[in-house]
Image (spheres, grey):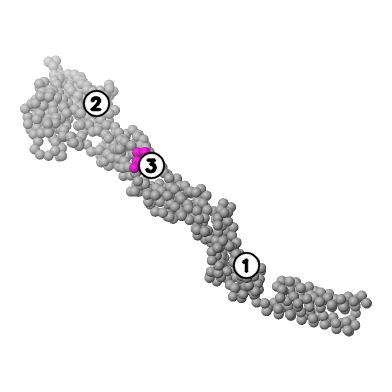
Amino acid sequence: MTDVDDNSHSHLLVLTVFFIETSGAAVRPVVSLSPNWTPIFKGESVTLTCNVTPTAQGNLGYSWYKNQHQIPGNQQSLVIQSGTRSDIGHYQCETGTNVKSDSIRLDFRPGWLILQVPPVVHEGDSLSLRCHSRSRSIARNPVFYKDNKIIKSPVSGSVLHIGRVDVTTSGTYKCVKEILFYYLSGKRYRFYRDERYITVQEMFTIPQINMIPDQVIEGDHMTITCDTKLSPRRATTELQFVFYRNGHNVQGFSSSNQYGVPSAQLEDSGNYTCEVQTSSGSVRKRSNMEHIHIQELFPVPQIKVSPDQVTEGDHMTITCDTKLSPHRETTELQFAFYRNGHNVQGFSSSKQYGVPSAQLEDSGNYICEVQTPTGSVRKRSNVLHIQKLELFTIPQIQVIADQVTEGDHMTITCDTKLSPHRETTELQFVFYRNGHNVQGFSSSNQYGVPSAQLEDSGNYTCEVQTSSGSVRKRSREAHIQTKGPSSNLQSVKLELKVVHSEMQKVNDQLSAGSTVQELAELKEQMQIRLDKNKSENEKQKRQKYDHDTIDYERGRVYSWNRFDGIKRDT
């Protein structure tokens, strides 16, 4: 059985030209063939067509060239009928933009068998090869080889469909076919072969990562581009781009070859790659890795306090220190301060927070924050704990003598203790009774009343301050009660009555002739009672009652003397 070539009639080869339009460049045509085969048998026809992309506007005139020389033809299509050896050459077309297309070679060959391939093959194309014999010839058993190895791809008639290709598909291809010839002695098949080297061209180059600007500082607008170049014959191919940082996707596939960061931060530093593919994904390429380093606009601020040790009343200054990059020394910075997480000074151009007279409540955990005016870069310091030292302790109010009796000299003191670091500080004291000032500020910590009266009773407080008033503290309230003299006099008189009563009992016992034992028991009871009364009396002020006390003591001595005399007599 013999195979008959599928194309037994003349073939028409059409060359189509597309335009490339690049930014700022003129429209450029691109040439392709239809049917997309080369070489061509002598005697076959081919049509060249020059098309422009939709972006080209207006009425375009066409010109055709062969081997750099203009040839007749001003239409979009150029037809070569029954090509001969004289039609062999490199063809170009030109439009009204005066930009010529790339050339394409037309080759018309004699012979019985040619291996036909597309004039240009790009990665991602679906490639077919044709083992083409003369029209009206009878042929059979086409076999294809690549680099002298049989290709086992399916064959449809005389066409081998290889499918989608990449640059590794490049190589030397060959086809072998049996063609029937008639001789006087009879018919016989003869083997014919043809080979051709096929180069699979890049659809687009391996992409390159580039950064704009070359040097990026925190807060800058950074643009990373994924640059590649399409083959001139595939200039209208739509590409898609994707970007990665440290292996993680930062911008998915899109038609943009740029990845923009409006305000670059340090964390945007890293190893960047990009990937480019056709819309169908038939060709996909990844760039080399590019390390991009974002430079600091200013380092993390350091918070400091002056003086190093702050005592109540001191002028305290907290500073937020940082340093601008030499490339951005004119950048204006703003500073803010916080204590225990609460803002104590909002953003301003001052890097200092001052406290004219520091108080204990100004102690705490301080941080500062620095930013650019737009807030594009913002950094916070570490925490600094500031502890204020007490200048002097909270005063204690005290009165000399546990009890104050009407007419007594009463002295109230306001006691406090200065810090060892501020022992020479001059303090001032003031005293209040029931909220009313009784002694204004002075250097004395005592308030004296020469002769206390009942109306001097009340709730006393004192207050201590520095001479400038920068530190001021108040004592707790102390109640002082002044007692009248009548209560003490009545108590003493009552005790004297008791003593006299007891002494009368002794006299009665002596008159009744009591025994020594009974008198001894009575003495013991009286001694206990007298000791108790003495103990209670010693707690009282007795200056006003000396004469009563003397009478009391004389009476007691007299009684015991009588008792002892009786005992001695017995």
Q: In the structure shown, which secondary structural element does the residue marked by tag 3 occupy?
A: loop
Tell me the kind of residue under disc 2.
Answer: Thr
| Dot 2 and dot 3 residues touching (CB under 8 Å) | no
Callout 3 amino acid:
Leu
What mark, if any, has residue 324 been given in the picture? 3
Q: Is residue 326 magenta?
A: yes
The secondary structure making up most of the magenta span is loop
At a point 15% along the width and 20% down the height, the residue shown is 111
For this rendering, which residue is in front, 137 or 277?
277
Q: Residue furthest top?
A: 185
- Of helix, strand and loop, which one carries label 2? loop
Residues shaded magenta: 323-330
Frontmost of labels 1 and 3 is: 1
Q: Please, is residue 361 above or below residue 61 in the view?
A: below
- The answer to whether residue 506 of the structure is visible from this angle is yes
Identify which residue is drawn at 8% across, 38% down. Answer: 59
Looking at this view, is 52 or 427 the one in front?
Answer: 427
State which tag comes first along the sequence, 2 or 1: 2
Q: Is residue 259 above or below residue 529?
A: above
Q: Quadrant of residue 145?
A: top left
Percent coordinates x, y for residue 236 in the rendering: 20, 36
